[in-house]
Image (cartoon, rainbow, N blue to C red):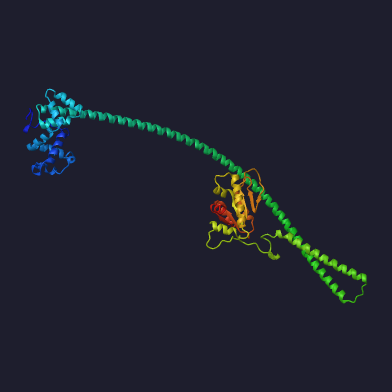
Amino acid sequence: MTGPGAGPDGLPEVPVPDALLLPLVEAAGDVLRSLDPADVPASLRHLQGFDRRGLLHGPAPRQLRRAFDGDAAFRAAVSERLRARPEVGSTLAAWSVGDAVRLVEDAATRHDLPLLASVLYACRPPGAEFGLGLVVAADERARLERGDADTARAHQRELAALEEARRRADAARLDAEARAARALDELKEERQARRAREEQAERAALAAQRRAEQLGAQVAQLEAALDAERARVTRESQRAHALEDDVRRLRAEVTAAVERAEQAPSRLQPGDAQLLADAAASARRLGETLDALRRRVEVAAEPARGPGAAAGGGRERAPARRARPALPAGMVAASREGIEAMLRGAGVLLVVDGYNVTKRAWPDATAADQRERLGIAVTALHRRLGCEVLCVFDGDGSGPRPPLRRGGVRVVFSDAGEEADEVVVREVQARPKRVPVVVASSDAWVREHAEAEGAVVVPAEAFVAVLVR
């Protein structure tokens, strides 16, 4: 069937886009896959192994359309396959040149333009050329409308994105302003806190200076009293030595007199012999009294002999370095076993940096509860290991507090303006060098100064393991 405006073999000369002939291409692919190899057009033999999906993508649709246009036998087979579809028959039955415009508009509304174009292109009813022109024009118009709609949607998306960006920028600006305001408030608070700390530090420094002056005055008084006591002891010692010489001389004289009396012929009357015996007894009592006085003088002189006293009195010199607690070979001082081994030694003093230990053992308890729990734990430790225990806590600033004693444990508090760390080191310094000292603290300043005094410092964490055993 040949229509007006048709080309060779009656094919329409209207350039129809490949997308509008998709049903035609599907029918051509079905025909190609159903042909025997000998009946396949030469131009399509390389496509015979493709599946239905492969024939609808890439260059295959265009090659199928070209074979449809150039091979009459293949075109007849494809047209027959296409006509066999029910929708193609109804489309051909409804086609009319007079109603072509309406039919094309209806097909565009139903999105059936590819079906109508394929029917007109393959079956070539009367007015096919005119109908194809209308279909191509309708498709172009639809694509333009879709393009305008896509452009409008893209514009709307851009506007929405700009609005979202503006909103986020406003939110970021408000957040930045709020953070800047918070930073200013925090800076003001930090400045106020720093001024308060500086004022507190100045007050503490003044208090420490006054305390140092008081301690200096007390030290001067103690040194003066010590010098006076040493002078007194020296005088008493000299007096005792003089009395010893008198006693020895009197004893010698009494002994010589007794010997002479025994050797000489007795010319004494009975009363004279009694008087001589009384005199000898009085001399012995005098010697005993002088011996007791000498011993009392020596005892009184004993405290004045410190590390700097001369060795001429037969006293033992103080050791140059502090004695170390016994630690068995292979044990580490900072371990639970090592701490227990050291504390079992004879004469060992344990000094506990109170809150430095309790804040690791009972961090959620109040200060009073921490002190009570530590007191109970070190009392049990004293009973178990036999060591002397001294616990040092920071004072609350309410004034001097007397030391507390409980079951082999002594508890002391620092004075106002003084830290417990200083008291810990001072207590170590006050102990004689012959006393081994173990300090439980994780404070770096305490470790440095206590070790300089010869003490063994163990971490608070390791000591807590000993307490809670």
- Percent x, y of residue 453: 60, 57
- Percent x, y of residue 108: 19, 27
Residue at 64% over, 56% down: 431
Residue at 71% over, 54% down: 224
- Percent x, y of residue 248: 80, 68
- Taking the image as shown, residue 10 lies to the left or right of residue 296, namely left
Vertically, is 120 above or below 303? above
Hey, which quadrant is residue 47 in on the image?
top left
- Percent x, y of residue 340: 57, 57
Image quarter where the N terminus lies is top left
Vertically, is 261 above or below 376? below
Q: Nearer the viewer, residue 203 or 398?
A: 398
Vertically, is 269 above or below 332? below
Q: Nearer the viewer, residue 394 or 372?
A: 372
Residue at 85% over, 68% down: 280
Vertically, is 352 above or below 27? below
Q: Nearer the viewer, residue 405 or 355?
A: 405
Note whether residue 53 is visible: yes
Note whether residue 422 is visible: no
Residue at 65% over, 62% down: 318
